[in-house]
Image: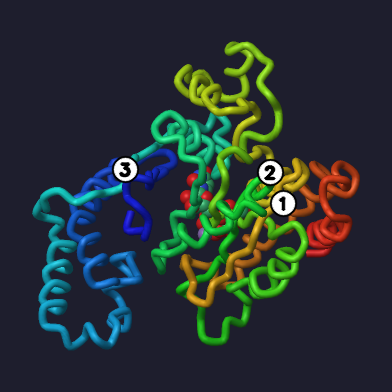
Amino acid sequence: MAMDYPPEKLHVYVSDDGGSSITLNGMKEAWKFVKWWIPFCTRYRILCRCPEAYFSDSENDSDDLTENVEFIAAKRTIKVIQESSSGEKEQVKLPLLVYVSREKRPSHPHHFKAGALNALYRVSAVISNSPYTLVLDCDMFCSEPASARQAMCFHLDPKLSTSLAFVQFPQKFHNISKNDIYDSQHRSAYKVLWQGMDGLDGPLLSGTGFYIKRESLYRNYKIKDTDFELQEYVGTSNEFIKSLKQNSSPIVNVGFLYGTVCEDVHTGIMLNCNGWNSVYCDPPKPQFLGNSATNLNDLLIQGTRWSSGLLESGLIKICPLLKCPLRMSLLFVYFLEFLCTLR
Ligand SMILES: O=c1ccn([C@@H]2O[C@H](COP(=O)(O)OP(=O)(O)O[C@H]3O[C@H](CO)[C@@H](O)[C@H](O)[C@H]3O)[C@@H](O)[C@H]2O)c(=O)[nH]1
Ligand SMILES: [Mn+2]
């Protein structure tokens, strides 16, 4: 909500997968608070715009602010408002905030995160249909407000934009221990491999912290089907089908892929196979911070999920070496297969 981007061009969709009234109430409170928070951040040029992270560390304030009496008083007021969530401020330009929840039943496959993301895509196509989307996990926050502008520099670059599917930021974490003996930061991926892939066709889709072009998720299939046939792919919303047809090249087979434990990698490889590429953006200051698994048990569970997902996608379900070598550079294909099989 507090991103450094024109508010009328921002639409924030919060996915409450499964749905809970506590999250909905939390969002209503956040909506009241944001009317105070955004003007405060803009006025004092606060960079860390996640309130919880900002108030937990006094070093977030620049040196010239710590002496400023007016700022100290404003900060105290904002903290009180945050705690009581009271008070309504008059007119501030805010991005659109949309709460989305979907029902989950044991008898009906919900496809985990990929299902949740596709539900967001369906809803947002009808409400805002913005051409670019930032995907962020629920355990991550924006630690700098500039990432949208940075990503749009790539997306709007005439040399890159026609084939650019997404701009990937590294996953960085705020809960890393001093020695990090289990490599919870995933240094091999975000500091070495992704940099290398950036020199080829671009990094793999990494689940969170990426700005993706909506059109790339609609793949390359032109609609030839009737509305009735289309409903099998994209669901029964007539409004959504209308929004698909409004695009200049209406297409089907929309969204993140199902049937895998790593929907991100699988969808990313599929995008590469369809001729799209990506860019890695790793500015010196982290744009997003998240929670990483920090104990051996959680890391082994996560590692097993990722390794089996990579193997499944890269060797069995997509296998770029066999299915699409001509659309990617050969070195990139070898690299993908190396990553999928040897990780
Ligand atoms: O049924 C589900 C399950 C998960 N999620 C969301 O998926 C995200 C990631 O889940 P998390 O439990 O944090 O898993 P991690 O192992 O931390 O996720 C890493 O690995 C996943 C792929 O395996 C990627 O999608 C993630 O972006 C990446 O951070 C979270 O925002 C969840 O809210 C749903 O919305 N619905
Ligand atoms: Mn996570």
How packed mark 2 is, by other alpha carbons closer than 10 Å (few <14, some 14-19, many 20 or more), is many
Identity of the residue drawn at 33% across and 66% down: 49
From the viewer's perspective, tell me whether residue 102 is left or right of residue 329.
Answer: left
- The residue identified by callout 2 is 260
Q: Do the residues labelled 3 and 2 touch (CB within 8 Å)?
A: no
In terms of secondary structure, where does tag 2 sit? loop
What label sits on residue 137 in the rendered view? none
Distance from the alpha carbon under mark 3 to that under mark 2: 32 Å
Which-is-in-front pick, marks 3 and 2?
3
Q: Do the residues labelled 2 and 1 touch (CB within 8 Å)?
A: yes
Does label 2 or label 1 sit earlier along the sequence?
Answer: 2
Which quadrant of the structure image shows residue 188?
Answer: bottom right
Distance from the alpha carbon under mark 2 to that under mark 1: 6 Å
Residue 295 image position (x, y, % from top left) = 56, 72
How packed mark 1 is, by other alpha carbons closer than 10 Å (few <14, some 14-19, many 20 or more), is many
Q: Do the residues labelled 3 and 1 touch (CB within 8 Å)?
A: no
Question: Is residue 215 shown above or below 280?
Answer: above
* Mark 3 CB near ligand 1 (8 Å cut): no
Q: Which amino acid type is marked by label 2?
A: Thr
Identity of the residue drawn at 55% across and 28% down: 247
In terms of secondary structure, where does tag 1 sit? helix
* Mark 2 CB near ligand 1 (8 Å cut): no
Distance from the alpha carbon under mark 3 to that under mark 1: 35 Å
- The residue identified by callout 1 is 309
- Of residues 303 and 14, the one nearer the viewer is 14
- Of residues 258 and 54, the one nearer the viewer is 54
